[in-house]
């Protein structure tokens, strides 16, 4: 994926980079997520790009993680309190270390109800995906299972503008392990 003139109807590298760095306007994000929902080639490109970025950031994350862990041990020793929980990261359950969780593309942050789609990256050897949507208080609102990495919210699911919602996509693989996007949050805007 290079220049849009070379590949019409696909995202450019510049658009993809701005999207993955979260440097796009709400309108541009909606347009890009709509495209990702319908274009498997661009979803694969986004997933590959994000994996490269994760590998490039890993040394900094390891150093930061070590510093945080040392600080937590000192705080626990001094204050003698329960351990401080780690920041929210994609969850990987039942998977050998080194395998990544699923990548969540959207919605996150502010989102519009019209055309609301949930989009996440694919994982190898997946039998099925399960998407769950809850209210901020944890009440189950909707779920869907299938083999696609895109799900459109049915009109029958009533969401309110200004409310916070949480969603998660889990994948079950051939060996029975589960991968997850971890909880993602969005709020509806007019």
Image (tube, rainbow, N blue to C red):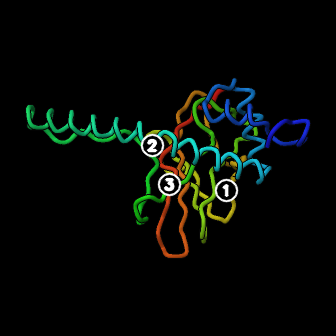
Closer to the chain start, of discs 1 and 2, is 2
**Viewer-side residue, 38 vs 143:** 38
Quadrant of the drawing holding the C terminus: top right
At horizontal 57% and vertical 61% (from top left) the residue drawn is 130
Which of the marked residues, 3 or 1, is nearer the chain's N terminus? 3
For the residues labelled 3 and 1, the Cα–Cα distance comes to: 14 Å
- Relative placement, left or right, of 7 versus 74 is right
Up the image or down, 170 lies above or below 165; here it is below
**Labelled disc at residue 58:** 2
Q: Which residue is mark 1?
A: 149
Of tags 3 and 2, which is closer to the observer?
2
Check contact, mark 3 vs mark 1: CB within 8 A: no
Which label sits in the foreground, 3 or 1? 3
Q: Where does label 3 land, which residue?
A: 101
Q: CA distance from mark 1 to mark 2?
A: 26 Å
Q: Where is residue 27 shown, x and y percent of the image? A: 74, 26
Q: Tell me the quarter of the picture where residue 149 sits.
A: bottom right
Percent coordinates x, y for residue 153 in the rendering: 68, 48
């Amino acid at each position: 994926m290079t220049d849009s003139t070379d590949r019409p109807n696909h995202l450019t590298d510049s658009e993809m980079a701005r999207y993955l760095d979260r440097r796009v306007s709400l309108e541009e994000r909606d347009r890009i997520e709509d495209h990702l929902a319908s274009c498997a080639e661009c979803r694969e490109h986004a997933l590959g790009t994000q994996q490269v970025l994760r590998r490039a950031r890993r040394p900094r994350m390891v150093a930061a993680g070590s510093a945080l862990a040392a600080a937590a041990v000192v705080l626990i020793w001094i204050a003698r309190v329960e351990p401080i929980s780690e920041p929210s990261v994609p969850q990987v359950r039942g998977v050998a270390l080194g395998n990544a969780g699923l990548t969540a593309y959207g919605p996150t942050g502010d989102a519009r109800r019209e055309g609301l789609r949930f989009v996440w990256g694919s994982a190898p050897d997946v039998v099925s995906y399960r998407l769950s949507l809850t209210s901020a208080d944890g009440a189950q609102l909707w779920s869907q299972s299938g083999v696609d990495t895109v799900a459109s919210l049915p009109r029958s699911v009533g969401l309110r503008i200004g409310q916070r919602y949480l969603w998660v996509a889990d994948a079950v693989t051939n060996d029975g392990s589960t991968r997850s996007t971890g909880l993602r949050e969005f709020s509806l805007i007019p």
